[in-house]
Image (cartoon, rainbow, N blue to C red):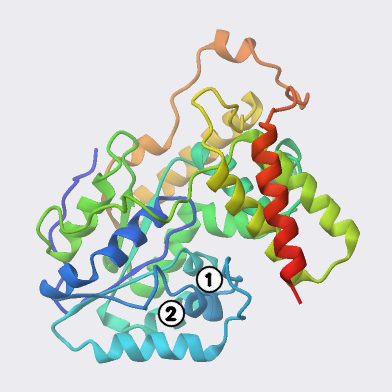
Amino acid sequence: MTARRQGALPPRTRLVHIGPHKTGTTTLQGAFHLSRRALAAHGVRYAGRSRQPAHAAAAIAGGTPVHSLEAPSTAHWEQLCAEVARAGRRRRVVVSSERFANADTDTARAVVDGLGGERVHVVVTLRPLLKILPSQWQEYVKTGHRHAYVDWLDGMLRRPPYDRPTPSFWRRHRHDELVARWAKAAGAENLTVVVVDQNDPLWQLRAFEDLLGLPEGVLQPERDGFTNRSLTAAEVEMLRLVNEELARSRRPAAERKLVREALVRELRGAYEPGKDAARIATPAWARRAAAAVSAEMVAGIRNSGVRVMGDLDSLVPAAEPAETEAAEPDGDEPAAEPRLPVSAVHAAVAGALAAAAGSP
């Protein structure tokens, strides 16, 4: 177990949180956005005007922000750099976007230089790969991908060089290499890994308060409004099938994006899945493969010289009892078709049709 508290970074620090995706970034960014006034009272500025500077991060590191048809541009990045520079020497500044995790080594160096050079301290948040796999696949489906989960896992875990159909996955989630790239850019002494505590959802907020010298409780999660709940297996399968139809229709990319996002929005608004709703299930062979990769990543991070808050060993799943694995099919047999209430399907389709009708 590594220390859960490390002490505050210097007052002039530019704390650059790079995610990666699916490591509690939505909760963290929502808490920073909600607490801007309280943060300012303690000498901390949260950069950007919205939940995260997605366009600025995408402009330099690649990717396309969701929920927006505006393309990232160099101007977005330059505006963010100028804002951080104006914050002054004594004020701490926080910049958070998981899109920075897309950066290669040279781009990571450019991010560090642009946001303050020697003042920059990079923070990487991590959660178990086994939790990330279904969550990240779901996000890919939300952006238009059409591969079934088992097929996607096959490409990521069993088919070297493991870069099809989504090359960005291991760039983001080979966490030892992610840490190494950014440690090279900022210096190992200027990088902290924060391991999410699966049993304490608020601990990640407390860790950032510690890094920023904030009193406990300044960062609070959003209670209402924005939601980023995971979709059920049935919801994702419905969206995946819609993606196949959208691809066949050859409609403009912007229109397809509107339809997908309207469908997801309406599903979330009209349907609150019960605890018994089927979730995305990772087969036994993929769990074993993920455990092996996780062990390699933890060893690499431990030897990297960066500081760690939280329990690195918690990122490696415990070995499953033999009887548990034996009870599951170990091949690629499709699971039973998930079910979705008709009312939820109606709301989602109606929203998607409305979005399509209103598109140019």
Q: Is residue 248 above or below residue 190?
A: above
**Residue 158 can be seen in this image:** no
What residue appears at the point 60 percent right and 27 percent down from the top-left corner?
278
What mark, if any, has residue 111 been given in the picture?
2
Find residue 109 and report its horizontal and vertical position in percent.
44, 79
Helix, strand or loop at label 1? It is loop
Find residue 339 and report its horizontal and vertical position in percent.
69, 28
Q: Nearer the viewer, residue 349 or 183?
A: 349
What residue appears at the point 63 percent right and 32 percent down from the top-left corner?
286
Residue 189 horizontal side relative to residue 254, left or right: left
Find residue 305 and report its horizontal and vertical position in percent.
31, 57
Q: Amino acid at mark 2?
A: Val
Mark toward the start of the polypeptide (2 vs 1): 1
Q: Is residue 326 above or below residue 220?
A: above
Q: Quadrant of the C terminus?
A: bottom right
Per the image, the residue denoted by label 1 is 103
What residue appears at the point 72 percent right and 70 percent down from the top-left corner?
358
Q: Nearer the viewer, residue 267 or 23?
A: 267
Helix, strand or loop at label 2? It is helix
* Marks 2 and 1 close (CB-CB < 8 Å): yes
Q: Amino acid at mark 1?
A: Ala
What residue appears at the point 77 percent right and 26 percent down from the top-left corner?
334
Find residue 84 and report its horizontal and vertical position in percent.
31, 85
**Residue 173 can be seen in this image:** yes
Q: Is residue 190 above or below residue 79?
A: above
